[in-house]
Structures are given as C-alpha cells and as structure tokens.
Image (cartoon, helix red, strand yellow):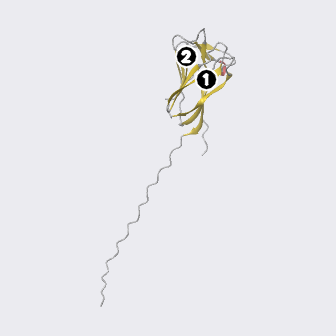
C-alpha cells in the first residue's frame, strides 16, 4: 500500500500556533506568505509554537521557513516534541551564513496521532553580546513513513479430536 500524501503547513497566526513573549510582525518578500514574526533575543524568553494535528502517525520530515536577516542569531533553538521526547536543533537565521526565504530541514521524527507533537522556536538560552533577533515564520510536517498496523495473529485452528476406537471383542477358538 503506498504512503498516503500528508503535508501540513502552519503559518504564523493560524490555528495550531501559540506564543509567549513579545513578537512583532514583519512583512517582506523572504517571509512565508509575505509575513513573519521577530523578537529580540535575550532577556525574557520568547517562544513560538507550531502544533500540527496529526491524523496519520508515523515518521515526518520537519521543516521551518527560514526568512533570515543579517541581524539574526546564528544558533536559534528549534525544539521538536516527538514520540520519544524533545530534540533541539540550532538554526542559523543570519543572512550571511544561513538560508534565505526557504524551507530549512530540521530532521525526521516519529510523531503520534493527535496534538501532542510540536515545533517550537525560542530564544531560551541565547545570551547575545549585542542586539540580536530571532524569527518565526512557518512550519511544515511531511509524512515519509506511516505507522503500519501489525497483522492480526490468526486464531489457532483446533486440532480435531480423534473419535474413540470402538471396543471389539475378539474371540479366538
């Protein structure tokens, strides 16, 4: 059976997003759908979370739209909550060394059905020496390998019960 085509894209401000901290809107051609968010790194922690509704459990390739700029941090933490825990991938959001206005592959992870998986962009742990910013724009989740249901174990076929052998009286003269 072929892998079902599942691609979930969540843009900032859409259902499945949440945020803490101070985020500002920016409109630019590098942004996904011409709009993205930015926050100043350092100080109070900022978090922007993309939470997909996973209907088909399995392994997903996860991407973040990277609309980088030359005043952005080069090590922005992207936390991925998946079936086995949380992994952090550092993303270069600086234009001099990072990608510019494109999907940035973060890795492949097993995601369970429901709404417990997420991609979160944060400045937690960043302590820049000068004014630096982070961005959040869009997240993409692409199913690569669905979880297959195990084949049911067939019920054992009972062995036939042998019929009793009738007793025969043998008389020898």
Residue placed most toward the observer, 99 or 9: 99
Q: Which residue is mark 2?
A: 123
- Quarter of image, res 105: top right
Q: Quadrant of the C terminus?
A: bottom left
Query: Number of numbered discs present?
Result: 2
Q: Nearer the viewer, mark 2 or mark 1?
A: 2
What secondary structure is marked by label 2? Answer: loop
Residue placed most toward the observer, 55 or 79: 79
- Quarter of image, res 56: top right
Check the image and name the residue furthest to the bottom. 173
Counting other residues with Cα less than 10 Å from the Cα at mark 1, is it few (<14), some (14-19), or many (20 or more)? Answer: many
Mark 2 and mark 1 residues within 8 Å of each other at the beta carbon? no
Estimate the x, y position of residue 19 in percent, counting from the top left. 52, 18
Q: Is residue 38 above or below residue 104?
A: above
Query: Which residue lies at the image location 41% right of the left edge and 61% below the top edge?
Result: 158
Residue placed most toward the observer, 4 or 45: 45
Estimate the x, y position of residue 115 in percent, counting from the top left. 50, 29
Relative to 147, 98 lies left or right:
right
Find the distance from the CA under tag 2 to the CA under tag 1: 17 Å
Query: Which residue lies at the image location 61% right of the left edge and 44% below the top edge?
Result: 2
What secondary structure is marked by label 1? Answer: strand
Q: Which residue is mark 1?
A: 138
Mark number displayed over residue 110: none
Which of pointers 2 and 1 lies earlier in the amino acid sequence? 2
Query: Which residue lies at the image location 53% right of the left edge and 43% below the top edge?
Result: 148
Q: Is residue 58 above or below residue 119?
A: below
Q: Is residue 64 visible?
A: yes
Estimate the x, y position of residue 98 in percent, counting from the top left. 67, 20
């Amino acid at each position: 059976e072929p892998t079902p085509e599942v691609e979930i894209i969540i843009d900032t401000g859409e259902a499945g997003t949440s945020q803490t901290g101070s985020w500002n809107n920016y409109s630019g051609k590098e942004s996904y759908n011409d709009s993205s968010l930015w926050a100043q790194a350092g100080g109070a922690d900022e978090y922007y979370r993309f939470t997909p509704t996973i209907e088909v459990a399995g392994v997903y390739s996860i991407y973040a739209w990277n609309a980088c700029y030359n005043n952005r941090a080069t090590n922005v933490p992207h936390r991925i909550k998946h079936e086995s825990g949380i992994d952090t991938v550092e993303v270069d959001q600086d234009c001099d060394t990072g990608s510019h206005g494109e999907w940035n592959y973060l890795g492949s992870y097993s995601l369970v059905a429901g709404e417990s998986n997420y991609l979160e962009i944060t400045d937690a742990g960043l302590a820049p020496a000068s004014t630096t910013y982070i961005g959040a724009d869009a997240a993409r989740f692409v199913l690569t390998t669905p979880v297959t249901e195990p084949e049911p174990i067939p019920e054992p076929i009972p062995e036939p019960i042998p019929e009793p052998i009738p007793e025969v009286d043998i008389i020898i003269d």
